[in-house]
Image: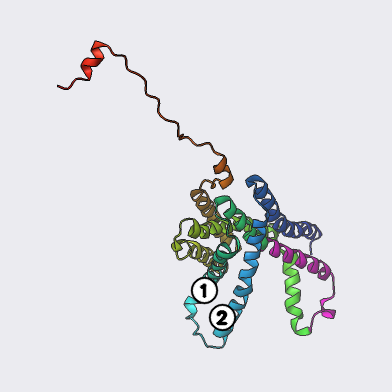
Amino acid sequence: MDLQQTSLLNVTHLLNGLIMVALPVGLGILLTRKFKQNGSLWWIGAGTFILSQVGHIPFNAALTRLFERGILPAPPQAWSLVVNAVILGLSAGLWEELTRFATYRWWAKDARSWRKGILVGAGHGGIEAIILGLLVLVTFISMLSLRNADLATIVPIESLERAQAQVAAYWGAAWYDSLLGAVERLFTLPVQIALSILVLQVFTHRRMRWLWLGLAVGWHALVDAATVYTLVRHGAYFAEVVVGISSLLSLGMIAALRSPEPVPSTQLAETPMLVTNQPAVIQPVEETTENLEKTRYN
């Protein structure tokens, strides 16, 4: 391995994981202070993501088993990638957005404003980035220990060749490739926030269409399916372009759905009334000849 490249990768692999953790934490602190909201909303969003994965991950594993055993018919080879991308997209959209709906319905009952929806979404996407960032850091530490180790003494013989290839690929990557995880999380956070705002519209506008196709579930499924398809067909760089475009569109959704914050009831109670019960004052009319003439019937 080239010593200079390895030294640079030591920095970029570590930086990749640190950014993935620090970015959502910093965003959560910034939004909480800027919006003057309770930080618990961020944690509610984080809990929402974790709860969604409790069902989402086993569901995908079970679905894979059903296809492998032939219980579900496998799609034609030419359509395999498209079908897999659509299934993965719909699976993520349904599990995450229905869980988000349940959160607003039964957990975050007071989160009914644009700012609160943003904080819930920042927590949802934020904890996802933190978990992935921690996994990146664990992988970095593992690869550091394996870089100069004799893998034959550590890895079973049947897995030795694959392990050697993985270590070589990790330390042989271009430095900018090792930062793609942080770039993806930067792009994904606005998408998750937009999805949180979309689901919130179910409660602020009382229309379920905000949850289903074309809106929350549909947008989530479309972004995930397009990313998976592009990643497999065209590689990581084109996939990041797709996520980046999705991020820009999501920022547009967030801005378009912005609404005034509801006025607290305590503030309404303190607002002085404009209408008073004072009787109207009738000014006397001077009894001149001209004024008397105006009151006569013709």
Tag 1 near tag 2, CB within 8 Å: yes
Q: Which residue is mark 1?
A: 87
Q: Which mark is residue 141?
A: none
Main secondary structure found in the magenta portion = helix
Q: Quadrant of the N terminus?
A: bottom right
Q: Is residue 117 visible?
A: yes
Residue 264 in sight here:
no
Q: Is residue 25 left or right of residue 143?
A: left
- Judge left or right: residue 177 versus residue 102: right
Q: State how far apart marks 1 and 2 are (Cα).
A: 10 Å
**Residue 73 position within the rendered picture, expressed as x and y whole percent measured from the top left:** 49, 85
Residue beneath the point at 56% across and 80% down: 63
Q: Position of residue 277 (x, y in %)?
A: 45, 34
The C terminus: image quadrant: top left
Q: Residue furthest front?
A: 287
Amino acid bearing label 2:
Leu
Is residue 134 inside the magenta stretch?
A: yes
**Residue 263 located left or right of residue 18:** left
Q: Which sits in the foreground, 158 or 243?
A: 243
On residue 63, the disc is: 2
Q: Residues within 10 Å of mark 1 (few under 14, many from 20)?
A: some
25 over 82 or under it: above or below: above
Image position of 35 (left or right of 201):
right
- Name which quarter of the figure residue 57 lies in: bottom right
Q: Which residues are magenta?
A: 128-156
